[in-house]
Image (tube, grey):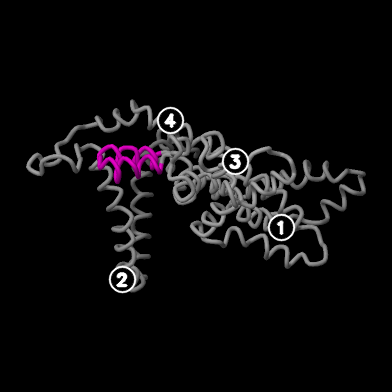
């Protein structure tokens, strides 16, 4: 006898109960897994707690300071009263903050795009077999391996108005009639800092993209050559699409690292002249350690953290998508 409709529906488990049973099953599995690996968890617990404190405490402390009136030049008896979002409003309404934000976005766009383009061009060249390729690959890594401060000090000497090799070369090539104070003029300071950033960072993009290139099957290029495709057509139809997962990850990593960049610009220009190179990290430094307005500095820092989190989430999703593909 066929079961009636009421019999079938009576045998079906309600959806909330299904969800509850599934959650209970997952919880029991996690519990069994924890009991099975208790010793391992106990061994890594001190390190995990230390890392959590080192990472979380500064963030939580900054978040608290960002909603308090926190200035050094005030009576100690006043304490640090809660001011809500006043520090955030002061940051957003500050002309210096908005200018720094705009400079930061320009700095990110120009340097990331140039580093990526130079990286992919270098990767393609280093993927071509030629004599001495191993040596050239090693030499390409040098800018990335050089410490930031050392690189900046070398470029300060190269940019020097009187004795710099760059000015000397440009004058000999008759590209300029007079020497240029690259780091001292408002029109050139930011671009000079960008150049150092690009020189320092493009080898990373080249290495990552070269690894992606080497994972592409050569049979695809051989088939394209048989079909009469040019090198440019092969790049557009094979290389670039196959590199897309790696390219997205590299691009997002470059953005994340550039957002928090401080050392290169600070060593080269200190944010000057006339604040034309004051990226957001330098604004935060000046607000906190020059003006001693730690509430404003913390609010600006939390805004910078929020921007970084957005790109970090995008990076994690891109990484997960790349692993699945």
| Dot 1 or dot 3, earlier in sequence | 3
Residue 54 lies in what quarter of the image?
Answer: bottom left
Which residue matches tag 3? 180
Identify the magenta region.
281-306
Tell which circle, 4 or 3, labels the residue nearer the N-terminal end.
4
- At 62% from the left edge and 46% from the top edge, which residue is drawn? 115
Q: In front: mark 2 or mark 1?
A: 1
Crowd tier of the residue under label 2, counting other residues whose Cα lies within 10 Å: few below 14, some 14–19, many 20 or above: few
Q: Residue at x 64, y 49 (%)?
A: 166
Q: Is residue 186 above or below residue 258?
A: above
The earlier-in-sequence mark between 4 and 1 is: 4
Q: Is residue 322 left or right of residue 237?
A: left
Q: Can you identify the residue that label 4 sits on?
A: 99
**Magenta stretch: helix, strand or loop mostly:** helix
Q: Residues within 10 Å of mark 4 (few under 14, many from 20)?
A: some
x and y, in percent, of residue 117 in the image = 67, 44
Residue located at (55% from left, 46% from top): 318
Q: Is residue 168 visible?
A: yes
- Foreground residue, 75 or 316? 75
The answer for how far apart the CA atoms under marks 4 and 1 are is 43 Å
163 to the left or right of 41: right
Foreground label between 3 and 2: 3
Q: Which label belongs to residue 42?
A: 2
**Circle 1 residues within 10 Å: few <14, some 14–19, many ≥20:** few
Q: Mark 3 or 2 closer to N-term?
A: 2
Based on the picture, tell me whether residue 285 belongs to the magenta stretch: yes
Q: Which residue is mark 1?
A: 215
């Amino acid at each position: 006898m066929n079961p009636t409709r009421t019999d079938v529906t009576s045998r079906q488990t309600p959806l909330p109960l299904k969800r509850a049973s599934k959650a209970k099953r997952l919880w029991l599995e996690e519990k069994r897994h924890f009991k099975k690996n208790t010793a391992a968890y106990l061994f890594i617990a001190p390190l995990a707690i230390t890392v959590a404190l080192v990472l979380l405490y500064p963030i939580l402390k900054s978040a608290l300071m960002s909603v308090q009136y926190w200035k050094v030049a005030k009576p100690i008896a006043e304490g640090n009263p809660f001011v809500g979002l006043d520090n955030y409003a002061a940051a957003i309404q500050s002309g210096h903050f908005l200018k720094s934000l705009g400079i930061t976005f320009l700095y990110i766009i120009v340097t990331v795009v140039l580093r990526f383009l130079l990286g992919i061009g270098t990767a393609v060249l280093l993927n071509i077999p030629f004599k001495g390729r191993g040596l050239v690959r090693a030499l390409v890594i040098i800018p990335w391996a050089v410490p930031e401060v050392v690189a900046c000090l070398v470029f300060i000497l190269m940019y020097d108005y009187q004795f710099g090799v760059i000015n000397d070369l440009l004058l000999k090539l008759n590209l300029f009639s007079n020497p240029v104070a690259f780091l001292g003029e408002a029109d050139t300071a930011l671009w000079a800092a960008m150049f150092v950033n690009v020189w320092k960072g493009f080898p990373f993009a080249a290495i990552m993209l070269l690894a992606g290139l080497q994972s592409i099957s050569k049979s695809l290029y051989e088939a394209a050559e048989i079909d009469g495709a040019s090198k440019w057509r092969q790049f557009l139809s094979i290389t670039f699409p196959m590199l897309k997962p790696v390219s997205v990850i590299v691009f997002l990593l470059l953005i994340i690292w550039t957002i928090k960049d401080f050392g290169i610009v600070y060593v080269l220009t200190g944010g000057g002249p006339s604040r034309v190179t004051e990226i957001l990290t330098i604004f935060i430094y000046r607000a906190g350690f020059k003006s001693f307005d730690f509430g404003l500095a913390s609010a600006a820092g939390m805004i910078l953290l929020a921007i970084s989190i957005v790109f970090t989430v995008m990076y994690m999703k891109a990484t997960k998508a790349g692993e699945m593909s």
